[in-house]
Image: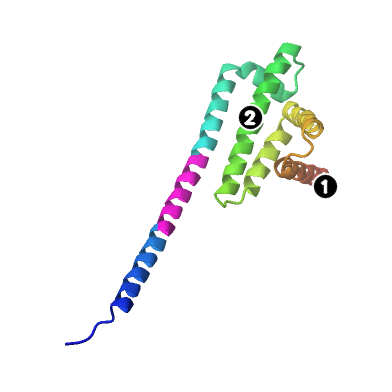
């Protein structure tokens, strides 16, 4: 009969248990990460749906503001609230794309083109940026700076084609 080294057997079983535990933890972390990514994208989508509902309720003021028509103080306050909600929904989507390791540059280009296509919205953006720079100069500026750089690029490409 063979002599079994009990200590070595216990050590081997313990190592197998540790490896199994590490595999379980790795799978759990991956699952948690997948859930967080889905939640982030869901929140970004939900933010855009809420904005669309706001615009549906105030479409006349939104369109008037986009075209740069003269707005009363009341209308401007409502347009400002809509534009701020729109910007925040876009920012949420931008951050969601960053968090799930997607390149948000295409999204920034689309946002800048949307701003550039609507004079009233572009004027609002410049006022909003000034207000943001004044009230919160230490905040993360990567989103607005990316948009401003893209707006400058659009402006430069327009001036070379004219």
Is 76 on the left-hand or right-hand side of 47? right
Q: CA distance from mark 1 to mark 2?
A: 30 Å
Quarter of the picture containing the N terminus is bottom left
Residue displayed at 57% across by 48% down: 99
The quadrant of the picture occupied by the C terminus is top right
User: Badge 2: few (under 14), some or many (20 or more) residues near its Cα, within 10 Å?
Assistant: some
Residue 117 x, y percent position in the rendering: 71, 34
Q: Residue 160 — which label? A: 1
Decide: is 96 above or below 24. Answer: above
Q: Tell me where residue 70 appears, x and y as whole percent.
A: 77, 16
Q: Identify which residue is drawn at 20% across, 87% down.
A: 2
Q: Is residue 129 above or below residue 10?
A: above
Q: Nearer the viewer, residue 71 or 38?
A: 38
Residue nearer the viewer, 9 or 143: 9
Q: Tell me which numbered mark, 1 or 2, is placed earlier along the sequence.
A: 2
Instruction: In the displayed orientation, state which residue is furthest to the bottom.
Output: 1
Q: Secondary structure at mark 1?
A: helix
Q: Position of residue 76 (x, y in %)?
A: 73, 17
Does residue 18 belong to the magenta stretch? no
Q: Is 58 positioned to the left or the right of 140 in the image?
A: left
Q: What's drawn in magenta, residue-wise?
A: 25-41
At numbered mark 2, what does the secondary structure look like: helix, strand or loop? Answer: helix
Q: Nearer the viewer, residue 12 or 103?
A: 12
The image quarter in which residue 122 lies: top right
State yes or no: residue 40 in magenta.
yes
Question: Splitting the image into 4 quarters, where does residue 7 fall?
Answer: bottom left
Q: Does any portion of residue 63 appear in the rendered image?
A: no
**Dot 2 corresponds to which residue?**
86
């Amino acid at each position: 009969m063979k002599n079994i080294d009990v200590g070595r057997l216990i050590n081997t079983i313990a190592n197998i248990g540790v490896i199994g535990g590490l595999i379980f933890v790795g799978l759990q972390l991956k699952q948690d990460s997948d859930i967080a990514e889905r939640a982030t994208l869901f929140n970004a989508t939900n933010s855009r749906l809420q904005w669309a509902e706001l615009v549906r309720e105030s479409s006349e003021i939104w369109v008037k503001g986009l075209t740069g028509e003269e707005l009363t103080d009341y209308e401007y306050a409502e347009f400002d609230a809509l534009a701020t909600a729109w910007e925040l929904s876009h920012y949420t989507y931008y951050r969601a794309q960053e968090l799930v390791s997607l390149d948000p540059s295409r999204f920034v280009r689309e946002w800048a083109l949307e701003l550039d296509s609507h004079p009233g919205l572009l004027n609002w953006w410049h006022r909003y940026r000034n207000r943001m720079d004044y009230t919160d100069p230490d905040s993360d500026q990567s989103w607005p700076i990316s948009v401003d750089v893209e707006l400058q690029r659009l402006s430069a490409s327009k001036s070379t084609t004219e």
